[in-house]
Amino acid sequence: MKAAALLLAGSMALAACASDESDSGSGGGSGSGGNDELMIGLAFDTGGRGDKSFNDSAYAGVEAAVEELGLSMEDNVQTLSPNDDASNRGELLTQLAEQGYDPVIAVGFNYDEIIADVSQDFPDVTFAQVDGSNADGAKGDNVTGLLFAEEQGSFLAGVAAASKTETDNIGFVGGVQSPLIEKFQAGFEAGARAVNPDITIQSQYLSPAGDFSGFGAPDRGYSVAQGFYQNGADIVFHAAGGSGEGVFQAAVEANKRAIGVDSDQWQTASPEQQAVIMTSMIKRVDNAVMESILSVANDEAEGGTDVVYDLESDGVGLSTSGGYIDDIADVVEDYRQQIVDGSITVPTTP
Amino acid sequence: MVVILNRAVPLFLAGLAVSVAFRMGLSNSGVEGQYRLATILSAAAGAAVALPAPLHVLLIIVVAMLVGAFWAGIVAVLKVTRGVSEVISSIMLNFIALGLASFLLTGPLRGSEPGASIITTADIPESGWFPGLNGVFGALGLAEPRSELYGFLLVAAVAGIVIAVLVKRTRFGFDLRATGMSPSAATASGVDARGMVIKTMLISGAVAGLIGLPDLLGSSHHYGTEFTTGLGFLGIAVALLGRNSPVGIALGALLFGFLDRAAIPLQFEGIPASVVTIIQGTIVLAVVVANEIARRITRRQAERGGVQSAPPTSGDGSTDGGQGPGGPPPDPGAAVGTGTGPGVRSGAADGTRGGQQ
Amino acid sequence: MTESAPLAVELRGITKRFPGVVANSDIQLRVHRGEVHAIVGENGAGKSTLMKTLYGMHRPDEGEILVDGRPVSFRSPADAIEAGIGMVHQHFMLADNFTVLENVVLGSEPTRGGRLDRAEARRRIREISDAYALGLDPDTLVEELGVGDRQRVEIAKVLYRGARTLILDEPTAVLVPQEVDELFGNLAELKREGLTVIFISHKLDEVRKVADSITVIRRGTTVGTADPATTTAKQLAELMVGAELPVAQKRDSTVRETAVLQLREVSVAAPGGRPAVDDVSLTVREGEVVGIAGVEGNGQAELVDAIMGLRPLSSGTVLLGADDITAWSTRHRREQGLGFIPEDRHRQGMLLEAPLWENRILGHQTRPPAVKGAFIDRKGARADTARIMREYDVRAPGPDTAAMALSGGNQQKLIVGREMSARPRLLIAAHPTRGVDVGAQSVIWELLKDARAEGMGIVLVSADLDELIGLSDTLHVMLRGRLVATLDPARLTPEELGTHMTGAASTAGAA
């Protein structure tokens, strides 16, 4: 009993002194940063750094901006990850704002409600939210929504898949059944049907709404993709975050093709997976984050609106690493032009 | 401070729910599903009606408790009638509850607009909100904190007291503890083991139903895809940490709440957030191990010391020897926790070494 | 007293303290080589502490231990074994699904090339078995063995490890009379081979039969030695308890007309096919003790469970007074006047980890003084526990002591006191004095007799034939689930009863 109490007390002390130090430390940090130098705060969504997906992509954007501005990652940037159940998202933003970070960038639509609350408490801080809309300004004048036309990029992915399939059978694996991921599905299916109206498309989500495990379950991604391949699909597009790893693995084993998402996943894949990653639907979160930071640095941030990254602004698109879709580059470009022209309107719900 | 308390309230309720079952030797691993289902249904019920404020809140609480109890009751009925291990059935029911909650959320109970990224139930009208306690800070002359202290804290405290009295002071609680200590002796004493399983699980489930309400009634006012998950499992850890005593669980919940919120300052120092999870796990493991060792030592001492020659009570049998060589480990939490704040702080001061080894 | 040959074991002034208690003080013990030396004393007198000291399970605070005349200091049982001292525990420590051979060698396996050398082990076990007439087959599974054989396996285990001095802790507690005789035969063999046996017991007749010398312990210290040839059991017992003691002897019949319990054609199913209780009918009247005799495992336990409502009947009815209680719950039965002294007090009678006052409540959760309405009356329960401790001579520091800290006899007295305090109409006493010392035994007997005189009906299930004959007004013999004989205890010897129990006699017993 005694030992337990001691240990308990000990770890509390450990945590307590850590938090004490952090107070003084960050106080100094913001002091040295002062008003002239930009202090960038980045709050991740569940998964945090190292998800090889939009969290990492956002981080890359910060890195790029820091380099552009000649700042230092160590002195001018603070990143925070939420706890396991992500119940402290509000605290992440509040703490960053309180410690003098400006701009504060939140990654993920899960910050929707919270950012609206926190932005009111800190009217002088500039906020930006990746994947969150502030078109009507309801989240406050100091919040910019960084939106992506995922459906447009996914449309091209569907075009590529339908053009390259030999079985007229393709698949879509969604991480979590949510409006955001449904945009991917809608665009992908529309693109594929635009090329071949009779194509078979298998679609499945790894977890239902409210259960975010589908973004981090490679085992489930693997088994779903495996099922698709066995049912005759030869190309599977995933929008499932970390679960995509399983999709690629299934593609390797079935000797079929897969399409990556968010970043150019061919770049970070193992050689055997590079052989199957036909293309990736790139979502330039990094560009969005970088531009958002630069606009603050240049005092050009508007706030109270959305910045939409679409095909026209190259905010979304297809990667060409590996050269697998070079032969259909014309077709893809043709459809891209039609979307940019507005002659094709891509649906956002399946 | 407020955020720690706000985090600790649901954890406390979760620990309490688990501990009631633990006391009887039952493992309610289904707290997670019970509270998720209870929260969404009570949120829907709260949004569907308009009542005067106190009644509205009461209705939501009652619905949540009933749903939680019902879901836990399935586990109990399966155990009593079919002999299904409650661990297995409650975990299975977790999956069903989560699926059901998702279905309800995206289907019949969807209250958010079609395009919204976060899917939620409809908002509960203001009469169904639980007022916060920040007024207390004002009354005490303290600065009002940025976030609102959940008023549900009071409900949790009442629940803690009710459970403590129920378990320690009532006949029912005696039956419950007796069954936990020795099922065979309890049965021989006339305890209806099956009935106890059902009643205990109903109580555990009813408390579990409350877990989501601090957030629901205090801040979010709807259940949605971003609603805090995993509290049911943390509850098991908190119950272990608090050694099933309500006071201990309260301390355990505060500790977990504190550690959880410490993740942010730690990150400012460049220490990854996962360190907190590691510390939490280490603490629970250490406490469980230490508990077991302490239990064995007291047991051995009691057996050795007592069996030999307990001095005769020579007549009066007074209670002079209250500290017999081996009382059952009472609740050490009570000893540590009578003065929450200072107790913890002084413990922290001299416990640094313990924590760093 | 002193002889020229060094003593096998000598203890000088051993004192052992536990927090708040002095378990042993100034113990003097001299055990000669090649003798059976009995240590007798009431439960709780300090015998077990003493033996644990000698076996290295803990170290004495004062005094010294000499083995073969040399002072030794044991840090663990391994040291004691090294010095040639082995212990046979009261509760066997055998793995049921292992063979005799595997159990014997467990922990000190002979190996050849890293593997268990079965041939060598088998040879040595046979050797030991033959030398001491243990009659063990190394390849039998332990689960197939009877209690006596298991005990011999334990003895073989100790001998296998080279023990020259054996400590036997209450070895006869678990044995039936025939097995006791066999054990004594084995002890004689051991003695003939020059081994020393320290025999702990509180059964004085046995001690006098088998021991060469006796040391008596009372209240933690040695109060004297005795020569079994010249000391009577009564003298020994008085030495043990420090006072004169009663015998199980009935007073005049107090049987009244009114029946308190009637079993009508009661049967209890058993998983194995043959019913555990088969068509049993019996009546217990007010003021009557009805004894159930029988070799254990013949349905007595199931019969007791059936009366208490702990086990469903397959057929038949149970009447308490005029009420048909067949469908009643255990709690309802208890509330309506059934008292229960269970056979296994640790499993059914007590919450070992709970304090005594909570144990006072157990089984009486619905009645004062333990409860007030829906609440536990802590004060009332504590006060009443103190009263029970006083009136029933339960020796413990106080009502807040954990039950496990009490000796078996004191635990049992608490249970008896608790059940008696509720003034039941019918008391079921299953082995009420099992594992209890002489002092507590006589107290419990007196209590049962007093209760009987006041008109309580008692069902007495026991394996102690003297107890059955001495206390019962009517005696039924149970064999394979059936009542096979009804005997008059007034005209019955233990030997006759024993024959009935094994089914050897015709069922035409006296009515």
Image: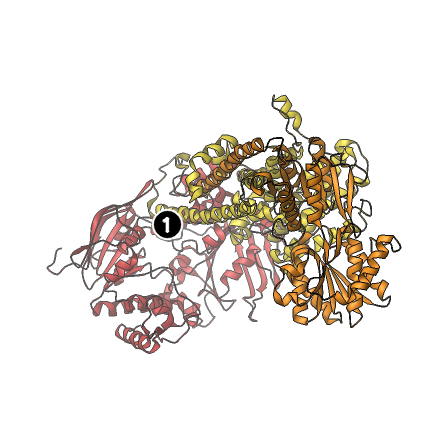
Chain colours: A orange, B yellow, C red
Residue B57 x, y percent position in the rendering = 74, 35
Choose between A246 and C49: the one closer to the eye: A246
Query: Does residue B170 appear in the picture of this structure?
Result: no
Residue B18 x, y percent position in the rendering = 59, 47
Q: Is B235 situated left or right of C414 in this image?
A: right
Q: Residue furthest right?
A: A343
Query: Split into 4 quadrants, where in the image is the N terminus of chain A?
Result: top left
Q: Is residue A338 above or below residue C298?
A: above
Q: Residue furthest left?
A: C4
Q: Residue at x 63, y 39 (%)?
A: A40
Q: Is A234 situated left or right of A61 in this image?
A: right
Q: Which residue is mark 1?
A: C442
Query: Does residue B182 appear in the picture of this structure?
Result: yes
Q: Residue at x 23, y 61 (%)?
A: C83
Residue C230 x, y percent position in the rendering = 20, 57
Dot 1: chain letter: C
Choose between B346 and A214: the one closer to the eye: A214
Residue C77 x, y percent position in the rendering = 29, 58
Q: Amino acid at mark 1?
A: Ser
Q: Is residue A182 above or below residue C479?
A: above
State the image quarter where residue C94 is shown: bottom left
Query: Split into 4 quadrants, where in the image is the C terminus of chain A?
Result: bottom right
